[in-house]
Image (spheres, coloured by chain):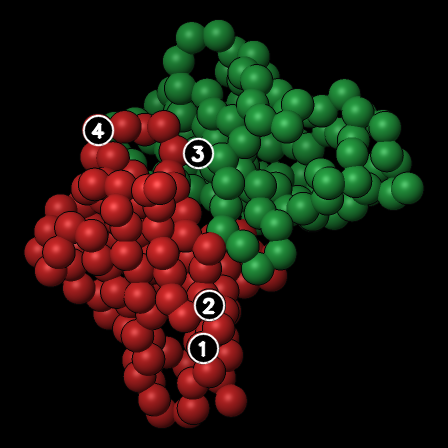
Chain colours: A red, B green
Amino acid sequence: DGGITQSPKYLFRKEGQNVTLSCEQNLNHDAMYWYRQDPGQGLRLIYYSQIVNDFQKGDIAEGYSVSREKKESFPLTVTSAQKNPTAFYLCASREQEANYGYTFGSGTRLTVV
Amino acid sequence: AQSVTQLGSHVSVSEGALVLLRCNYSSSVPPYLFWYVQYPNQGLQLLLKYTTGATLVKGINGFEAEFKKSETSFHLTKPSAHMSDAAEYFCAVSDPGSARQLTFGSGTQLTVLP
């Protein structure tokens, strides 16, 4: 079955460490997105990519980086510059020419220890 | 810029009662509108969507929503709540002319009381 796989489901980061969250899709979708979810704040867009080798900053990109070397993959790196990284991170994808909603992964919960 | 307001961060209903979750949006162009449901520690699942055409849209699990342009609203309803409906619900808006990012509301946590 097609879908989006996020790994790991739970991730712990020490102060000053960079960590990378994986997002892989086999839906042949062109566009991919990373969102951060905090209680009571809904979902906020971190980065998005509409085609391979191209991506744009969202509303809260500071302290994060991404790459899009393959259509199927859109990893997110949470750098040490992100001062409050503890959150639930969601990856999503969409067909480029369809405004019919996104497909979401099951999320990664990142905790700073 | 688009925005979405969900009135009520927490809503409680009794099992069998009407579910009404409110969503108002702001958009400079006719938007595409969505409702998503999220169970704990899971991703978002699409409940229903409005793009064009009929303003009353039906979704999964017995939910429906009506697009009212004059009220800039897209409220979610279900005639009879079930215990399994307890979850967080997000309204979202997409501007068809933009880079097609979704703007989400802050969510409504639905509790179903026995």
Point out which mark residue A9 bears: 2
Chain letter of disc 2 in the image: A
Q: Is mark 3 on a helix, strand or loop?
A: strand
Tag 3: amino acid: Val
Relative to residue A61, is residue B66 depicted above or below?
Answer: above
Q: How far apart are marks 2 and 3 (CA)?
A: 27 Å
Judging by the rendered image, the residue that carries numbered circle 3 is B93
Q: Where is residue B28 in the image (x, y as percent from the top left)?
A: 37, 27
Could you say whether the residue bearing mark 4 is in a helix, strand or loop? loop
Distance, label 3 to label 1, CA atoms, is 30 Å
**Label 2 environment density (alpha carbons within 10 Å; few <14, some 14–19, many ≥20):** some
Can you see residue B25? no
Q: Are marks 4 and 3 in contact (CB under 8 Å)?
A: no
* CA–CA distance in space, label 4 to label 1: 34 Å
Q: In which quarter of the image is the N terminus of chain A?
A: top left
Q: Mark 1 points at which residue?
A: A11
Going from N to C along the chain, the mark reached first, 4 or 1, is 1
Pair 4/3: label in front: 4
Residue at mark 4 = A97
Q: Residue at x 40, y 25 (%)?
A: B32
What distance separates the C-alpha of mark 1 from that of mark 2?
7 Å
**Three-letter amino acid code of the residue under disc 1:** Leu
Please state the horizontal and vertical placement of residue B29, each as a whole percent of the image: 35, 23
Badge 2 and badge 3 both on one subunit? no
Q: Which chain carries label 4?
A: A
Q: Do the residues at pointers 3 and 1 share their chain?
A: no
Q: What element carries label 1?
A: strand
Query: In front of the other: label 3 or label 1?
Result: 1
Give the answer, above or below, for where B67 lies relative to B34.
above
Q: Say what secondary structure mark 2 lies in.
A: loop
Distance between mark 4 and mark 3 Cα atoms: 16 Å
Q: Disc number at residue A56? A: none
